[in-house]
Amino acid sequence: MIFVVALWLNSLVNSAKLYQPWLRIISNMTLFRDWMGQGQIDGVIWTLEIEAKFYLFILLVWTAIGKGKLYSLPNGGDCEVHTTGWLLRLLHNL
């Protein structure tokens, strides 16, 4: 949000047009701009995007555990158990 205000103020001070399309600005503010097919405005936004997607993933897992749709790995977390199975069940059940 601060970056958008800085862009707007820069366009006012320098009497220039805001050269970024509004869709790109809004998609960059959501931190899911790559899912919307938009490019970056700021070069370091990718770090915040990774963090936001991580927290979204954790929220999905936590919600699934709360609803009883996700359980711990069988056999006490034995290394031979494929860990992708629980993720596929989670996505299918939500």
Image (spheres, rainbow, N blue to C red):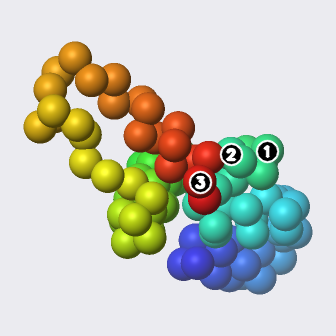
Circle 3 residues within 10 Å: few <14, some 14–19, many ≥20: few
Q: Provide residue 19's location: percent of width, then percent of height.
A: 84, 60
How many labels, in total?
3
Mark 3, residue position:
93
Q: Name the residue under label 2.
A: 34
What amino acid is at disc 3? Asn
Residue at 27% x, 23% y: name it. Answer: 81
Q: Name which residue type carries label 1.
A: Gly
Secondary-structure class at tag 2: loop
The N terminus - image quarter: bottom right
Mark 2 neighbour density, 10 Å: few (under 14) some (14–19) many (20 or more): few
Badge 1 is on which residue?
37
Does the residue at mark 2 contact the one at mark 3 (Cβ under 8 Å)?
no
Q: Which of marks 3 and 1 is in front?
A: 3
Name the amino acid type tagged 2.
Answer: Asp
Dividing the picture into quadrants, the one containing residue 67 is: bottom left
